[in-house]
Image (cartoon, rainbow, N blue to C red):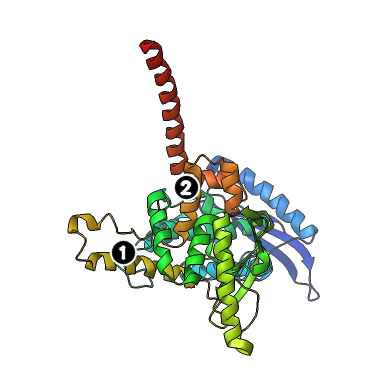
Amino acid sequence: MASIEKRGENSYRLTVSCGYDNNAKQILKRRTINLSNIKPIKQLEEAQKQFVLFENEIKKGMYVDNEKITFEGFVEKWLSDYANVNLQPKTLFEYKKLLTRINAALGHIKLIHLQPTHLTEFYNNLREDGIRKDGKPGGLSEKTILHHHRLISTILNTALQWGFILTNPALRVTAPKVKKQEARHYNVEETAYILELLDNEALKYKTMITLAIYGGMREGELTALTWNDIDFNNCVINIDKSLQHLPDKGTFIKSTKTENSRKISITKSVISLLREYKLWQNGVKTDLGNLWIDKNMIFTAENGDYIFPSTISKWFLKFIRKHNKAITNDISIPEDDKRNYMLHEVNFHGLRHTSATLLINQNTDISTVSKRLGHARTSTTMDIYSHALQKADQTASDKLDNLFNKKVQNKKQG
């Protein structure tokens, strides 16, 4: 028995006979296909093509029974067969957090029945007040909703590649739009002010923030540095790993992707600061003796063990707020002048943006900036720092204008 049976407005059921079992019962393989993306007049023709493909799958032993599997059921298969094997621990951890909410809303739907309308309704629900787990008013940000959409699309694309579905419904949904914003950072004057303020802070944090500004490193890259990564003679830092923390794994070192591994030059003043800090750390090691856990890390917990990766981020926020509070309470500074001494709150990652933006504004070519940041493609750098590039371009234009205007003026005066 072989048939193509119309089951609904856009649905067809394909049935292929695979002979008989030991009890003389006919073995039938069925697949329901949704052809809503095909014009009605062409649907039967497409169903016939799909029937031939379905029949060939069975003959070649490639048949996948997708009639009963739900979206959540496929997610479990995707996690075990692909994600757990190929994804980095932190990426997998973040995906599983997103999937908790996704499966709660979409997990019960049969994979082959999942439609763009289901996804659109889910995204609209994420925008509703009360959906946030932190208790804050309003729905999720468009950026967070976009993360959900991209994960769903990735999973469904795998389902398409593995033959569970014929089309990816996420591709027929308008992705949440995120308004592009300039990466928050400090300008030259503010950065110089911060470096000056750091002279009054603990040497450990002064060194960390200074390195972040001059090196443009990510939080995990900075906290993963060992003393072997510093070439004191040539003023070069090797960046090839990252420090991470996950609830189920604790704090651990992860190698950086090959394309993101890099060596960056650093100034002699920063090298001098690192030498000073190393002498201080050696003194701490001597004082603790056998209590010191020697992992050769530059930045450590009090006993030499791995520092918690977010320690520096939390410290930097406290540093800004402490400074601003001191300015607010300083009666020697006129009220109208206080805003000139205040620092706007930029998170630690903003120091990476600060480093890149300052380099671009100093006419450093984008390829060099991209390599220092560890971006795999210069297009990534150009996309993130388009605002800074526009300003640099305007400066270049102004220089040309000044150059030719000056020549015209000189000619007139002559």
Between 191 and 182, the residue placed more toward the observer is 191
Name the quadrant containing residue 87.
Answer: bottom right
Between 100 and 1, the residue placed more toward the observer is 100
Name the quadrant containing residue 125.
Answer: bottom left
According to the image, label 1 marks what residue?
A: 138
Horizontal relation, residue 212 to residue 80: left or right: left
Give the x, y percent position of residue 120: 43, 56
Give the x, y percent position of residue 247: 54, 78
252 in relation to 175, above or below: below
Q: Is residue 41 visible?
A: yes
| Quarter that holds the C terminus | top left
Q: Check disc 1 and report its element: helix, strand or loop.
A: loop
Horizontal relation, residue 74 to residue 339: left or right: right
According to the image, label 2 marks what residue?
A: 358
Between 216 and 141, the residue placed more toward the observer is 216
Give the x, y percent position of residue 331: 19, 66
| Quarter that holds the N terminus | bottom right
